[in-house]
């Protein structure tokens, strides 16, 4: 994708974040620079929320927001770290430094600098679940020393990986995955800004395809528009519909509709065991594919059945049993429409 990413071009402002409670918490972080831990699933918008916070809080966010992705250190070699333009000035002449000390040094130096404007700056540590305990202890000391001039924001999928002294120094901000409707609304705003042709079903299809991952949805919409020149259901299905396990799901539905339950359950086993999908993920794929497979009353009836199955999946322990029950009802669904 050669053009600028829509996730960057259309980064949300604070009042555009889809989660009401997150907007409220972060506004408090603007009014009073608290240390924060943003925790939630991948693609829920944690990093975008922090950037929106910084844009609201700082006159010069390009200089007073410092982003450090933990993977930039722990997943890279010492040479790669030292050659990174963001860190080179901090590490000049320190070739003998151990990798674990590099991030400590960069963090200490970043925290020690005065803000360019205002009274404080913001340092973000992304993907903090990968931070080892020894580094967390060093981070705690840096937070204590520079608390008057630096706001620390930690993003993570697993807040329990943080040591208690870190958690006790930060206000927790849970960031839930956006709903399908919220994602579709965001995609509509972006498509309108891009002057891209779209329809409601196309946006809903992409929201379903993303499964609560906002970044995946935005990039899916951009990919669809780039390849098809529009964001309609047909265009989105052509571009995104054959990705991942869609062929297997369609094969399973074909077999179930034909009454070939042994074959349908065999494919279901492949999805649950070989592909490692959860029952909820398989159900989401079924419903997403159903948007282009069924029309009218048939789709409505399927969603009614799926609602019962979704509750069973939440409360039960046997995903195969509950999804097999859904598959067994597809022939009746088909015959009822015949």
Image (tube, rainbow, N blue to C red):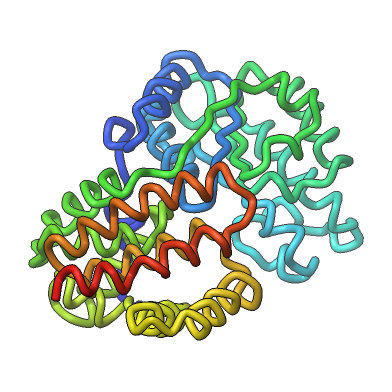
Front-most of 246 and 337? 337
Q: Is residue 47 above or below residue 97?
A: above
User: What residue is drawn where x is 37% and y is 30%?
Assistant: 59
Instruction: Measuring from the top left, give residue 136's x and y in whole percent.
Output: 80, 37
The answer to which image quadrant residue 303 occupies is bottom left
Instruction: Measuring from the top left, give residue 251's x and y in whole percent.
Output: 41, 85
Q: Is residue 246 visible?
A: no
Front-most of 21 and 146? 21
Q: Is residue 280 above or below residue 16?
A: below
Instruction: Measuring from the top left, give residue 23's x and y in whole percent.
Output: 37, 27
Instruction: Measuring from the top left, give residue 128's x and y in whole percent.
Output: 68, 44
User: What residue is drawn where x is 14% and y is 55%?
Assistant: 193
Q: Is residue 229 above or below residue 156?
A: below
Q: Is residue 24 visible?
A: yes
The answer to which image quadrant residue 257 occupies is bottom left
Instruction: Locate the C terminus and report the quarter of the image it occupies.
Output: bottom left
User: What residue is drawn where x is 82% and y is 59%?
Assistant: 93
Front-most of 54 and 24? 24
Instruction: Locate the N terminus and report the quarter of the image it occupies.
Output: bottom left
Front-most of 289 and 115? 289
User: What residue is drawn where x is 11% and y is 64%?
Assistant: 198
């Amino acid at each position: 994708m050669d053009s600028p990413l829509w996730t960057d071009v259309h980064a949300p402002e604070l009042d555009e974040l889809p989660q009401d409670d997150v907007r409220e918490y972060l506004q408090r972080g603007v009014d009073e620079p608290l240390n924060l831990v943003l925790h939630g699933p991948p693609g829920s918008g944690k990093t975008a929320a922090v950037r929106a916070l910084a844009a609201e809080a700082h006159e010069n966010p390009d200089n007073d927001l410092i982003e450090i992705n933990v993977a930039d250190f722990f997943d890279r070699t010492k040479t790669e770290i030292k050659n990174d333009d963001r860190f080179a000035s901090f590490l000049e002449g320190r070739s003998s430094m151990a990798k674990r000390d590099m991030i400590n040094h960069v963090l200490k130096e970043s925290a020690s600098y005065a803000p360019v404007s205002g009274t404080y700056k913001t340092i973000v540590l992304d993907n903090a679940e990968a931070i080892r305990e020894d580094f967390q202890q060093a981070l705690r000391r840096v937070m204590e020393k520079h608390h008057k001039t630096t706001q620390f924001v930690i993003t993570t999928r697993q807040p329990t990986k943080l040591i208690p002294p870190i958690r006790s120094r930060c206000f927790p901000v849970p960031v839930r995955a956006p709903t399908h409707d919220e994602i579709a609304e965001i995609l509509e705003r972006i498509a309108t800004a891009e002057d891209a042709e779209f329809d409601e079903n196309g946006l809903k299809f992409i929201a379903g395809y993303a499964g609560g991952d906002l970044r995946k949805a935005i990039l899916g919409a951009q990919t669809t528009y780039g390849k098809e020149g529009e964001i309609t259901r047909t265009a989105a299905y052509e571009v995104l519909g054959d990705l991942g396990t869609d062929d297997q799901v369609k094969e399973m539905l074909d077999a179930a509709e034909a009454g070939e339950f042994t074959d349908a359950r065999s494919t279901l086993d492949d999805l649950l065991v070989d592909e490692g999908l959860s029952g909820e993920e398989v159900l989401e794929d079924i419903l997403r594919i159903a948007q282009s497979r069924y029309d009218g009353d048939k789709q409505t009836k399927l969603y009614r059945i799926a609602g019962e199955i979704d509750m069973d999946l939440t409360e039960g322990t046997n995903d195969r049993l509950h999804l097999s029950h859904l598959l067994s009802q597809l022939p009746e669904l088909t015959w009822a429409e015949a």
